[in-house]
Image (tube, rainbow, N blue to C red):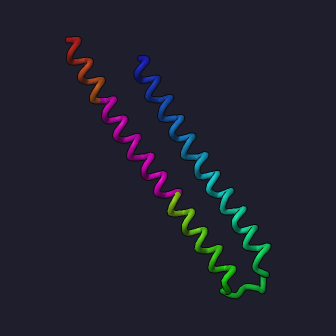
Amino acid sequence: MALTQGKEGGTARLMDSIEEAGTASLEALRRFADTVDSVFPHLGADEGPRRKIIDSAFKMTEQLVSTSTQLAQKILEVTETEIGGSDKRTTQSTK
């Protein structure tokens, strides 16, 4: 039972960490966009350097968050598999 509780607690902590990383990434992007806005004048809806820089930053952040999420999912899968295998080995050795 303690092993199961530990697994669930670890999963929750990992998911919280992923969410915090995503939030921090978005906040960093907002600060970056604010900096770009203060340096480059907003000249309308054109596709000038200001818009290209901001769009590129959004794409970069999206890729970073996506990659981090995929890594966390793989870590969870491997951990759950290992814990599941450990549970089976423990059950078999106690029989």
Say which residue appears at 58% left-offset and 73% top-offset. 56
Horizontal and vertical percent position of residue 12: 52, 35
Q: Is residue 45 magenta?
A: no
Q: In the rendered image, which quarter is residue 29 located in? A: bottom right
Q: Which residues are magenta?
A: 65-84
Q: Is residue 3 left or right of residue 31?
A: left
Horizontal and vertical percent position of residue 60: 55, 66
Q: Quadrant of the C terminus?
A: top left
Say which residue appears at 26% left-offset and 18% top-offset. 90
Task: Look at the picture and state if 13 lies above or below 6.
Answer: below
Q: In the rendered image, which quarter is residue 75 located in? A: top left
Please name whichever residue, 28 or 23, is drawn nearer the observer in this view of the structure: 28
Horizontal and vertical percent position of residue 84: 31, 29
Q: Quadrant of the N terminus?
A: top left
Please name whichever residue, 11 or 48, is drawn nearer the observer in this view of the structure: 48
Horizontal and vertical percent position of residue 61: 57, 63
Task: Look at the picture and state if 30 lies above or below 2.
Answer: below
